[in-house]
Amino acid sequence: MSNSLSRINLNQEVLLFRNEAFYDLVEEHCGSTVLEIIQAQDISSVDCLLDVRNIFTFLELDSNELIPLKKKAGIVLNDGSFIIKKGIMYKVDVFTRSLYRLNEQHLIDSFQHFNSNGSTGLIIPEILVQKFPFLLTLMNYSNFIINSKIDFTFFNIMMNNIIKNATMDERGYRYDNIIRQFASSLYILGGRAAYEFVRLNIPAFIPSTQVIQASIISSQHYLTEGLFDFLRVRDYFSSKQSTLAFCAEDSTTIVLKITYDSTSNMFIGFSLPLDQNGLPIPSLYSTDSFSQLENWYLNESMAKLLVANLIQPLSYSSGNLSPYLLAAYGTDNTFKATDVISRWRCIYHRCKANGIRLIGFSTDCDSRYLNAMKLSLGFFGDFIYDGHPDNFKIDVPSSWNWFLMRNKQLFICMQDPMHICTKLRNRLLSKTATLVLGDQIINLKPLYYVIDNFSKLDHGLVQSDVNQKDRQNYGSCEKISNDKVLKLLDNISNSFGISIYLQVIKNIRLAYIEKTTNVIDRIFHAWVVVFIFRCWSMWINSMDRQTLDLFVAQHSNSNFTPTENKNKTKRDFFITYQSHFSVEINAHSLVYLAVLFSEGQISAESLTIYLQNSQTCENTFRSARSISSTCSGGVNFTVFQFLSRIKKLSMLQSIKNNVGENKLRFPQHHKQSKISRNNVTQQNTISFSKHDIEKKVNDAYQYVIKLMSPLNLHQWLRNQQTLSIKQLSANISQQFQRSWTKELNANKNDDSDTESDSETSDTMADDASSNHDTDEDLDFDNGVDSIYNVTTSVHRGVRLVDDVKQEHAEKYFRVTLNNQIKFLHKQTACWLLEKDKSSLPADRLSRVQEN
């Protein structure tokens, strides 16, 4: 029926009808039976009728007094149920809808009159004010927002959307695009429980959960496992007007589980093999054969780690731009350094083809990544990019005998500075290593003394900061190396050694992590660390092991004897090789970038050192863990769950990037708001020359010589004289060259290429070789697989059905069960083949603690 036939022509005066006038109106348009129903409920005005909404609910009451009225209005069935006559329902529906439209139009006309003539021109009937007191509040609100500096755009859209929806049937609710963005953000940040709480308590405000879930699934933020999506990276960099980038790679432990992804028709959770470019082979585990899936469960490795590659734009134009997740995939951790090199080479060239210049890569201190960096930089190793047309080239002054890196580089490398700090802390807390520097044993005793004898207000430390089992705690690195602690250590006996050690951690923070440090000062802090370790390393190598053992025995409170320590090497009195080499790589890469900038080969954006680390990966993992619902205890994830959560995070980030249009405001962490972007930009765009760089390095050397002079290290150095910077650097160069030669010889006899760090308890590493027979052809019987040893015939709660629709056929296996053809859902097949349930501790730190 057309709209003209389904509405009554009424004027706005009827909205004020009460008592007899109201009853006459009802009888005229709805009949005497409806009038009796209304009078029986004591409905005596139009506004009361609009508030009741459904007058027939009254007749559902089980009362003998209503039987005569029920017989007039409808039909009473034999089972006692009651049906309203269609004609009566139609009359009432047309009448009430007309009144609702009339009331809505009256409110609109009133506000339009108010806007055109001012607040004194609007006369609101007393009856409306009594029924809707918020109208006066809205009038005051409209007066307020005219001159307010607060942006009420979203609030206005929200109120308008709610009021519009409230005047219609729920099935006809419509939502503004900005409301949908708000709803999606609320669902992602708060989870389903928080979303439902808001939706139920603010009717007509946000869509149902199902609508939001469908919106997220259908969004363009879809991530395929193992697929390096360079085209989307190109579009992202183009939208941000950035062409410089830094790539990070890192991994995290995951829950071992195979999951079926119905969107891609893939099984997610197996370890993806790598191709000749070091890239994972995507879309590999897809099959319509249950036997094939069963074979994979038996013979293929499950992913123990999830690897993520992120690309960080380097630009000042839009502040600190968010990194872009290039790819994520599961691995069994059996890759080699050569795979990393091939992958980085491919990433570099694919980025270049899309107009992006990668200036470097960053990872943690895994030995395979460290070897890949050596070869990529040619740093005491073969330079694999010699002759590459894209190589940078700097003019290194002849006086720079401390600079040991090649003058040609395709890109630089940075070991993650937070990982370096935690590894140095772990070395300090180690039960197997005994750090000796001159006449000092570096141990925890001075820190324990500080905690026990000084107020926490003076140092801020707690016992967990020196917990020997807690192996991944960067926050503790910051606390034990702050100025308050270092000042207290100055007044404690036998604390000079640990004071120097903690100053190393502090200088690493200032050089690579702090945002406000300018580049020239970063060079000073970085090379202070380098020269401390060079002096320490040379002194250790000048000593014989027996002398070191004897010194430890004389200065230790334990019953230590040199014979008990015969398996130790001189390396056990020093930091790990990985940490030492990482410090050298970072300091040289920092200087290389500074020289490129001073020569005008790169822009100031390339000097955003605090962005050139693998914390972008760590932050992504952390965000994925935190996105679980507020009522959920599951903070860890499988590969499939990570990909799903990343889809939500990408959608949320897209909404955040569009705040200029959607007017949504998101809370900002207090640490992110401490430092203004302009201050960071100013610090990093300071001009300097090669002479300034050289001066800072020489200042760092003189500072270290003065710092370490109380240790009397010169007694064990050449001719009992302090070595010059040239002699020291030449000596350390020979040490690194010998170490590299030993590694090459070791790798000739060992293909594992997974040199372990003695300070890293990586129980997830698996050196067993995996078999990836992806080209193997398997024969199956007529395309139907059989499931044996099944005795029950009822399968409640299991998606095992007799038939499926054609559009859903690819989601099911066709199997034979008890001589009957059945269709088994692929996720149910994963559940069927799962022999054990894997889990991880909810506290991530507990996974990196020593047993």
Image (tube, rainbow, N blue to C red):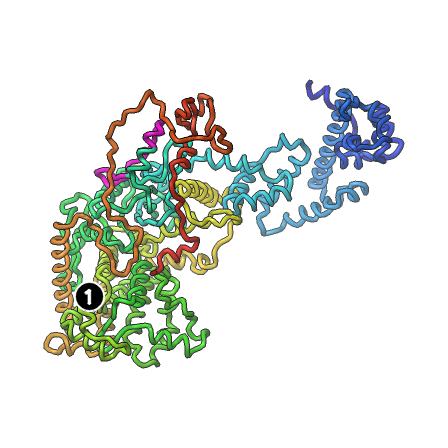
- For the C terminus, the quadrant is bottom left
Kindly tell me whether residue 58 is visible in this rendering. yes
Question: Residue 674 versus residue 709: which sits nearer the camera?
Answer: 709
At a point 67% along the width and 36% down the height, the residue shown is 166
Kind of residue indicated by mark 1 = Arg
Give the prevailing secondary structure in the magenta stretch: loop
In this view, the residue farthest toward the top is 1
Judge whether residue 190 is colored magenta: no
Kindly tell me whether residue 349 is visible in this rendering. no
Judge whether residue 291 is colored magenta: yes
Instruction: Please name the residue that numbered disc 1 is placed on.
Output: 571
Q: Is residue 7 left or right of residue 371?
A: right
At a point 13% along the width and 57% down the height, the residue shown is 742
Q: Is residue 497 above or below residue 108?
A: below
Task: Report x, y in % for residue 202.
Answer: 64, 43
Task: Report x, y in % for residue 607.
Answer: 30, 55
Label 1: how many Cα within 10 Å (few below 14, some 14–19, many 20+): some
Question: Residue 774 versus residue 134: which sits nearer the camera?
Answer: 774
What kind of element bears circle 1?
helix
The quadrant where residue 585 appears: bottom left
Q: Is residue 737 above or below residue 154?
A: below
Which residues are the magenta region?
273-293
The quadrant where residue 731 appears: bottom left
